Structures are given as structure tokens and as C-alpha cells.
Image (cartoon, rainbow, N blue to C red):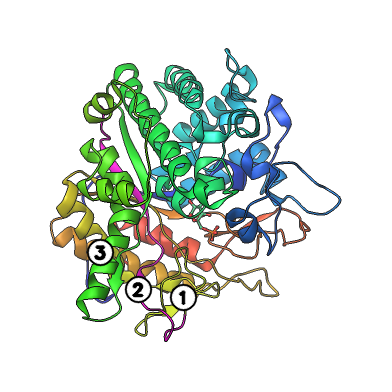
């Protein structure tokens, strides 16, 4: 693929992506309150905590470490980091605002000035370097007090608190931020309810009505955010953000094809249909009925959802997924976010994530065919173990190969006619991994000296991919 040259649109938004809890640190500075990421311990058990009942949302320093507490200390080092992003030529930088810096407990009446001032400084620094911020309003960072006192997104009251939060940040940053996104990977609530919906599944029934009621509250909250954004910042664009993993049928057995389609619809399209088309898709009616799910939909909710749809679709793309009804004779694709079965045509990363650049071309075409709104790849990248050489260099050719193939796949999709706004590579600077809480799963162009035990100088250095990505941006994607 890489010998061909691709034409990216003139104003293509090249950049990198992060999330507050994975880079900032300073978890109790500036009057910040505790959020979900602050109470999630690091290490191998983290994934289980995300999926199993009994999580108490408390910090237990005797038993666990909490890598997000210091993360990579962007809170104090943002100037140095932004200068490095500028050196690569970033047009945009995707980051999130920690809700708990603005409303420490989530339900206060007035925002926290220290938190607001911190993001003012970050946005000003970005603009100083000609970089536009792309801001995720909520990236796995719900205030813990809202979880404990209200039950996370199960509570309708949280919609009001979220509305207060978005009003505060839109009013404050209306001259500084023109690209927004509501909930990071909103569909992640289907597999990781703690991160996505702010509650753990305690009993089987929780997977049904409570889960989909929480989603409904997020849809209402998202529409209120779109409405407020359009009113307060008329020249801004606000998108949704989903995980998109095309679902392939393992073979041509029609039953497997139908099963793959059902999984695809629930996982890839249910949330996007509501946020982009402004209505619940027809297939969810059957799903709700068969699973005895009864939603409490208030008068006016559906009209609000219909009227205030998003301007673009932001999505993360890491892998595709292969499905088959009877999985007993196949190897499970365990490392993938949604398991499925192993695809015999694909290789996987060290964490088992199946690598499939063509899947990105498929994703872009499917999304554009279905919705006809601009698309934005706001996360994509390879988590890998990096080796630092004696002289401090990191030869991450594997990362370059991964990114090159995926950028080429975007070039193909653009030739197919897809309207693609931009690309922000995930973890453009090494950061704390969301699923493992570790530093050793690295994505960055910039190496951060810190290990899984929290040791290291936190010094930043340029990897080989840093120069490569700089050339990609400079040539607007022609030089891959
Ligand atoms: C997405 C999340 C990010 C991020 C990325 C990589 O699901 O939006 O927060 O971390 O995946 O995942 P991980 O860090 O687990 O490798």
C-alpha cells in the first residue's frame, strides 16, 4: 500500500490524541475532585475490575497503585509537551477536560475557578503554537461523587449536572475551542460500564433496563450539549465519539452473517444512530422487547434528540472483530476489546488486538454510506513495548509500519469519496494505558521515562516515529 501517494484534503486536521486522566496527573491539585480513573488501580487486575461486580470506587493505597495519580505530569509539563507537538507540525491536539477539575463533586452550583484557569492556560499555549484544541467533554472521567451518591448515569439528575458543566465550559472557552466531542467511546458502556456509564454491573438484571436507561440519559445529555454548543459557540462543531470495529462473519454461513450483522448493529450503530440520525434505530425495538427492557423516556426527550444531532462523527479505530454463532471450535480473540473469534488472516499486537488497516477503510466507507456526515478518526495507534537504546533512541519501526498502513487506508477511503476531516493518532505522547493502567503499553511519538512501577525521570524524548510523523504532516500525507 505504501508505494502509492495519497491526496489528503488541504485543511486536513493532523494531530494527536490524549485524555486528561491518562496524562495530567495532579489528581488532587487545583481543588480537583476524584473521578473514576483516580480510583481504578493499575496492573493486570484492572480489566477484571472493569468487568466484574463489587467495585467500591475507593482508593486503597495499601493494596494497589494508582498510575493515573501522577500519569505523565502534563499538569505541570504541558508547555514542554505542546512545544514538541508543535515541532511535529500538529494542526490539532485532542485532549479532554476533567469534569472534576471544573465541578469537583459534580453537583455543585458554581464551577471551580482553578480548574477553569488551568485549561485556559493549556488552550492559550496551544494557540500560541497555532494548534487548535479538539476537546472531549467526558473521557472516562465521571466524578466519583456522582457515582456513589446518584448511581452514575442511571440517574436522571446527572443530566442536569452535566448540562451545568457543559454550559460552564462552553461559556468560558467559546473563543478558544471550536471542535468538541461529547462522550468518549459512548458505546464502550456496553462492555465496560464502569468507564462508560459510571457504574458496575452488580447483578444480571443490571445489564438490561439500568444499562439502557443510563444510555438514554447520556443521549439526552449529549443532545443538550449539542444544543448549548450551537447556541453559545455558533462557529463550533460538536461530534459524537464511538468505538468502531467492523464486524466480519467468520464464514459465509448465513446464520453467522446474520449474527455478525446483529453484533455490528448493536455495537457500532445503536449509539451513533441516536446521536447522528436523532432517533432510536428500528432494530433496538426488538432488542428492548426481547430483553424486557423498559425505558423511562420523558416527554420531550425524543424531540430533543431529533432536533440536536451532532455535526460529525469522531471514532476510535484499533481493530476489526470476527464473529461466529458457535465459537466452541474456534480460538477466542481474547485481547480484543470485544472478543469474537480469531481472524486467520490477521496478526495481533502484543496485547492481542488484531491489526487490520483495511478494516479502517471499511469502517470509513460504512460510516459515510450510512450517515453522510464528516468523519474524524480521533484515535488509532499501536500499543507496543519500546526498547530504549544505549544512546537513548527508540527505533519504533513497528509503530511507523502500523500508522503508515492505517493512514494509507484513510487515503483509499478518501478516494472512495469519504468526507474525512482529520486524524489524531492515539497517545501521541506515551501515557497511562486505559485498559491496563500501565506505562509499558506505549503509543507515543514521544517517549516518557516512566515504568510500570512509577519509576523514572518523566523526561521526554523523540522516538524514530516522531520524525516520520513530522514528515507525514509536512507533506500532507504524501510522504508516508
Ligand atoms: C480507547 C480509549 C483511550 C485509550 C485507547 C487505547 O478505548 O478511548 O482512552 O487508552 O483506547 O487503549 P489502551 O490504553 O487500553 O491500550
Identify the residue position indicated by label 1 in the image: 333
Tell me whether circle 1 and circle 2 mark residues in contact (CB < 8 Å): yes
Assign a secondary structure to mark 1.
loop
Assign a secondary structure to mark 3.
helix
Identify the residue position indicated by label 3 in the image: 261
Q: Residues within 10 Å of mark 1 (few under 14, many from 20)?
A: many
Tell me whether circle 1 and circle 3 mark residues in contact (CB < 8 Å): no
Q: Quadrant of residue 440?
A: bottom right
Quadrant housing the C terminus: bottom left
159 vs 254, left or right, is right
Which residue sits furthest right? 62
Can you tell which mark lies on residue 322? 2
The residue mark sitting in front, 1 or 3, is: 3
User: Which x, y percent locates residue 14?
Assistant: 36, 50
Q: Residues within 10 Å of mark 2 (few under 14, many from 20)?
A: many
Measured in 3D between alpha carbons, the distance from the residue under mark 2 to the one under mark 3, in whole angstroms, is: 11 Å
Residue drawn 51% across and 73% down? Answer: 334
386 vs 445, left or right, is right
The residue mark sitting in front, 2 or 3, is: 3
Quick check: can you spot residue 343?
A: yes
Residue drawn 58% across and 56% down? Answer: 51
User: Does 277 lie within the magenta span?
Assistant: no
Residue drawn 42% across and 21% down? Answer: 170
Quadrant housing the N terminus: bottom left
Instruction: Answer with mark 1 or mark 2, whichever residue precedes in sequence.
Output: 2
Q: Quadrant of residue 320?
A: bottom left
Residue drawn 60% across and 65% down? Answer: 441
Q: Taking 214 as reference, is 235 above or below it?
A: above
Residue interval drawn in magenta: 308-331
Quick check: can you spot residue 97?
A: no
User: Which x, y percent locates residue 386?
Assistant: 61, 71
Of residues 84 and 242, which is closer to you in this image?
Answer: 242
Amino acid at each position: 500500500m505504501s508505494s502509492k501517494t495519497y491526496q489528503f484534503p488541504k485543511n486536513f486536521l493532523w494531530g494527536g490524541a490524549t485524555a486528561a486522566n491518562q496524562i495530567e496527573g495532579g489528581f488532587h491539585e487545583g481543588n480537583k475532585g476524584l473521578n473514576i480513573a483516580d480510583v481504578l488501580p493499575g496492573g493486570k487486575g484492572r480489566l477484571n475490575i472493569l468487568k466484574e461486580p463489587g467495585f467500591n470506587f475507593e482508593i486503597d493505597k495499601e493494596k494497589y497503585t494508582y498510575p493515573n495519580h501522577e500519569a505523565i505530569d502534563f499538569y505541570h509539563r504541558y508547555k514542554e509537551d505542546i512545544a514538541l507537538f508543535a515541532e511535529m507540525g500538529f494542526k490539532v491536539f485532542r485532549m479532554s477536560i476533567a469534569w472534576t477539575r471544573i465541578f469537583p463533586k459534580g453537583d455543585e452550583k458554581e464551577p471551580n475557578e482553578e480548574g477553569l484557569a488551568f485549561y485556559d492556560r493549556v488552550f492559550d499555549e496551544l494557540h500560541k503554537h497555532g494548534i487548535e484544541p479538539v476537546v472531549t467533554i467526558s473521557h472516562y472521567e465521571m466524578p466519583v461523587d456522582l457515582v456513589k451518591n446518584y448511581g452514575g448515569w442511571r440517574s436522571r439528575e446527572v443530566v442536569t449536572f452535566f448540562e451545568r458543566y457543559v454550559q460552564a465550559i462552553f461559556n468560558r472557552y467559546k473563543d478558544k475551542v471550536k471542535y468538541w466531542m461529547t462522550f468518549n467511546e459512548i458505546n464502550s458502556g456496553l462492555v465496560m460500564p464502569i468507564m462508560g456509564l459510571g457504574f458496575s454491573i452488580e447483578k444480571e438484571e443490571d445489564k438490561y433496563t439500568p444499562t439502557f436507561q443510563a444510555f438514554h440519559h447520556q443521549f439526552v445529555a449529549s443532545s443538550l450539549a449539542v444544543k448549548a454548543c450551537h447556541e453559545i459557540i455558533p462557529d463550533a462543531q460538536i461530534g459524537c465519539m464511538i468505538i468502531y470495529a467492523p464486524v466480519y462473519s467468520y464464514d459465509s454461513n448465513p446464520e453467522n452473517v446474520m449474527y455478525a450483522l446483529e453484533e455490528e448493529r448493536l455495537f457500532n450503530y445503536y449509539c451513533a444512530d441516536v446521536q447522528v440520525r436523532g432517533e432510536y434505530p428500528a432494530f433496538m425495538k426488538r432488542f428492548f422487547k426481547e430483553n424486557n427492557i423498559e425505558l423511562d423516556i420523558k416527554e420531550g426527550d425524543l424531540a430533543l434528540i431529533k432536533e440536536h444531532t451532532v455535526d460529525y462523527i469522531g471514532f476510535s479505530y484499533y481493530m476489526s472483530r470476527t464473529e461466529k454463532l458457535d465459537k466452541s471450535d474456534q480460538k477466542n480473540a481474547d485481547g480484543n476489546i470485544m472478543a469474537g473469534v480469531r481472524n486467520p488472516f490477521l496478526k495481533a499486537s502484543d496485547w492481542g488486538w488484531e491489526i487490520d488497516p483495511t478494516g479502517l477503510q471499511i469502517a470509513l466507507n460504512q460510516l459515510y454510506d450510512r450517515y453522510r456526515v464528516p468523519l474524524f478518526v480521533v484515535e488509532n495507534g499501536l500499543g507496543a513495548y519500546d526498547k530504549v537504546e544505549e544512546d537513548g533512541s527508540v527505533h519504533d519501526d513497528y509503530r511507523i509500519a502500523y500508522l503508515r498502513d492505517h493512514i494509507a487506508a484513510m487515503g483509499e477511503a478518501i478516494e472512495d469519496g469519504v468526507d474525512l476531516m482529520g486524524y489524531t493518532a492515539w497517545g501521541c505522547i506515551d501515557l497511562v494505558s486505559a485498559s491496563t493502567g500501565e506505562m509499558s503499553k506505549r503509543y507515543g511519538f514521544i517517549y516518557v521515562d516512566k515504568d510500570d512501577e512509577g519509576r523514572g525521570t518523566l523526561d521526554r524524548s523523540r522516538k524514530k516515529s516522531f520524525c516520520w510523523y513530522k514528515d507525514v504532516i509536512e507533506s500532507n500525507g504524501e510522504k508516508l
